[in-house]
Image: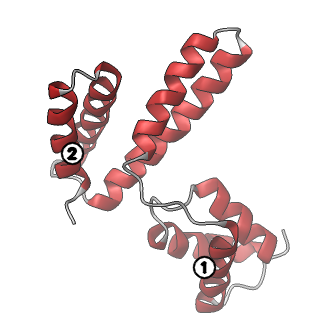
């Protein structure tokens, strides 16, 4: 299975050929963010880092769409949502609530966490394991609920 970089390169060519301006612009934006991450590290970012970049972009688009909708700009909110759908297409399938709960239970058992004070240990394990498949806030919520927070 090709990596995210390869998929982006292929999809960018296809968007150019198909004259899909929104898709092309969004892909270029994603590639730019990844390039910034590469420069930040001084080497090519790993897939895990790219997934974090994509998740950050998703969060920004969601927040921006919400703000535009509140501000009475449905046109800009719709554009953000369209970009959001394109960015999400490069993320792995998101975990359902039941799967997330199972993963959190396994990590709690693995780390021996007993209280909310041990949450950091569990989050460290789960954040790596579920990279790109669940947002940090969702993971945190699940762990907190299981630890009685």
**Quadrant of the image containing the C terminus:** bottom right
CA distance separating discs 1 and 2 = 30 Å
Outermost residue, right side: 148
Residue at x 25%, y 59% (from the top left corner): 46
Q: Answer left or right for 38 relative to 115.
A: left
Question: How many circles with numbers are drawn on the protein?
Answer: 2
Instruction: Tell me the number on the disc at residue 39.
Output: none
Instruction: Tell me the number on the disc at residue 103.
Output: 1
Name the foreground residue: 131 vs 43.
Answer: 131
Q: Nearer the viewer, mark 1 or mark 2?
A: 1
Query: Where does residue 24 sit, x and y in percent of width and height?
Result: 26, 27
Query: Where does residue 14 sit, x and y in percent of width and height?
Result: 18, 35
Query: Where does residue 135 sit, x and y in percent of width and height?
Result: 57, 55
Q: In which image quadrant can residue 95 be found? A: bottom right
Residue at x 67%, y 62% (from the top left corner): 140
Helix or strand or loop: what does disc 2 sit on?
Answer: helix
Question: Residue under circle 2?
Answer: 38
**Quadrant of the image containing the N terminus:** bottom left
**Label 2: how many Cα within 10 Å (few below 14, some 14–19, many 20+):** some
Q: Answer left or right for 36 relative to 121.
A: left
Q: Answer left or right for 118 relative to 110.
A: right
Q: Answer left or right for 31 relative to 100.
A: left
Helix or strand or loop: what does disc 1 sit on?
Answer: helix
Outermost residue, front side: 18
Of pointers 1 and 2, the one earlier in the residue sequence = 2
Query: Where does residue 43 sit, x and y in percent of width and height?
Result: 15, 51
Name the foreground residue: 95 vs 114.
Answer: 95
Residue at x 19%, y 60% (from the top left corner): 2
Residue at x 51%, y 24% (from the top left corner): 80
**Label 1: how many Cα within 10 Å (few below 14, some 14–19, many 20+):** some
Callouts 1 and 2 close, C-beta under 8 Å: no
């Amino acid at each position: 299975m090709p990596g995210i970089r390869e998929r982006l390169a292929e999809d960018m060519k296809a968007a150019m050929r198909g004259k899909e301006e929104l898709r092309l612009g969004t892909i270029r934006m994603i590639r730019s963010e990844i390039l910034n991450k590469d420069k930040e590290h001084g080497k090519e970012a790993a897939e895990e880092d790219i997934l974090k970049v994509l998740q950050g972009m998703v969060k920004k688009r969601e927040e921006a769409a919400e703000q535009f909708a509140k501000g009475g700009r449905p046109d800009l909110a719709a554009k953000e949502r369209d970009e959001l759908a394109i960015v999400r297409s490069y993320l792995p399938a998101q975990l359902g609530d039941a799967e997330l709960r199972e993963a959190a239970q396994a990590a709690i058992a693995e780390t021996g966490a007993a209280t909310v004070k041990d949450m950091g240990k569990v989050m460290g394990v789960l954040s790596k394991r579920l990279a790109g498949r669940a947002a940090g806030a969702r993971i945190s919520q699940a762990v907190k609920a299981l630890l009685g927070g």
